[in-house]
């Protein structure tokens, strides 16, 4: 029982980060209909920016949690403005191809600027682990699980209830109707990319200490984020949150009770099962008009 509880906490910690990545992907897709394959690159740069803040500048993690999302959100908005906005009237294949190579470019920029195998970050919360009988829970695991989940809920609430979320929901429901209601397409798209990029940057801050910082982090995060989004339903923020948790638990259970090699395989197995059984995802939302 004690081992089971530790596995569950570990799975929730990984899954919370996956949820944060997936929510960022879904926010951009819902508001702009863009499938953003550059999201993993934004997560990588978020982790690298956190490394610079915490290790190089010797600031606290709280500074990273506040500064990095704004920086990466601004970068994502700049990418939308400079590259994707001129391609807005192009076909879907062109836009997807552009995001793929933007993601590759961001990873290569990191590789060229910091040519090392992997960068390690200190634990976000120092101190001895908690002992509950035979159960050992580290402060870092508990903080990542709680912090990333809280950030995911905040992102969900912003989209669902905040004023800026209303404009994104309207655009997601009907672009023409939202435009007729006075919403600016350019402004809404910029907001969506900022929010999605900020969530990616924050996910990088949470992922860096446990996973290390290397170009492989971008691949791992974009894979996990997309699998979580597909499992939950690509049109559902709630589904992205639950899909990330489900994926994190599945990977951790597979690694603990089957084989470490199954950790990666289980995500693709889950993906194909969901696509074959429920292509719309396990928690997809009903299609409603918002305007």
Image (cartoon, grey):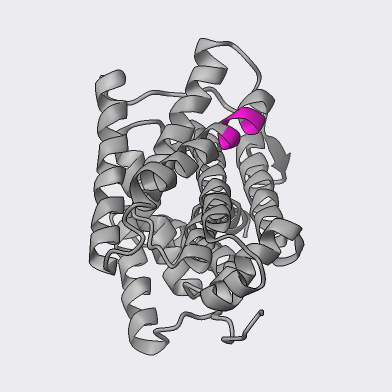
Q: In the image shown, does 198 or 178 lie closer to the viewer? A: 178
**Image point 62% across, 54% down: which residue?**
2
Q: In the image shown, does 274 or 38 lie closer to the viewer? A: 38
**Image point 65% across, 64% down: which residue?**
167
Q: Where 285 sits versus 60, above or below?
A: below
Assess whether residue 164 is covered by the magenta stretch.
Answer: no
**Image point 72% across, 61% down: which residue?**
157
Q: Bounds of the magenta span?
A: 65-70
Assess whether residue 66 is covered by the magenta stretch.
Answer: yes
Instruction: Name the side, left or right, on which 9 lies relative to 197.
Output: right
Q: In the image shown, does 287 or 154 lie closer to the viewer? A: 287
**Image point 37% across, 73% down: which residue?**
270
Q: Where 128 sits versus 193, above or below?
A: above
Based on the displayed image, in which of its 4 quarters is residue 217 positioned? top left
Q: Which quadrant is the N terminus positioned in?
A: bottom right
Based on the displayed image, in which of its 4 quarters is residue 156 positioned? bottom right
Q: What is the x, y in percent for residue 169?
A: 63, 69
């Amino acid at each position: 029982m004690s081992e089971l509880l530790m596995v569950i906490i570990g799975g929730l910690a990984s899954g919370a980060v996956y949820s944060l990545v997936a929510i960022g992907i879904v926010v951009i897709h819902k508001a702009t209909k863009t499938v953003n394959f550059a999201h993993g690159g934004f997560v990588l740069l978020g982790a690298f920016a956190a490394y610079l803040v915490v290790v190089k500048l010797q600031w606290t993690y709280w500074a990273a949690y506040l500064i990095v999302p704004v920086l990466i959100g601004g970068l994502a908005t700049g990418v939308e403005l400079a590259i994707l906005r001129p391609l807005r009237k192009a076909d879907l294949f062109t836009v997807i191809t552009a995001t793929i190579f933007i993601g590759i470019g961001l990873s290569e920029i990191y590789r060229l600027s910091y040519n090392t195998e992997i960068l390690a970050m200190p634990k976000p919360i120092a101190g001895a682990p908690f002992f509950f009988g035979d159960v050992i829970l580290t402060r870092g695991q508990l903080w990542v699980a709680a912090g990333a989940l809280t950030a995911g809920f905040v992102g969900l609430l912003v989209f669902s209830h905040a004023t800026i979320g209303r404009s994104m929901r309207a655009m997601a429901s009907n672009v023409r109707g939202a435009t007729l209601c006075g919403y600016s397409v350019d402004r809404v798209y910029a907001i969506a990319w900022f929010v999605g990029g900020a969530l990616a940057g924050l996910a990088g801050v949470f992922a860096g200490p446990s996973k290390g910082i290397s170009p492989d982090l971008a691949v791992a995060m974009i894979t996990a984020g997309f699998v979580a989004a597909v499992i939950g339903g690509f049109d559902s923020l709630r589904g992205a949150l639950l899909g990330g948790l489900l994926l994190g638990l599945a990977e951790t259970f597979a690694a603990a009770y089957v084989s470490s090699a199954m950790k990666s395989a289980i995500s693709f197995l889950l993906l194909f099962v969901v696509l074959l059984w429920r292509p719309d995802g396990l928690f997809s939302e009903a299609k409603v008009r918002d305007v």
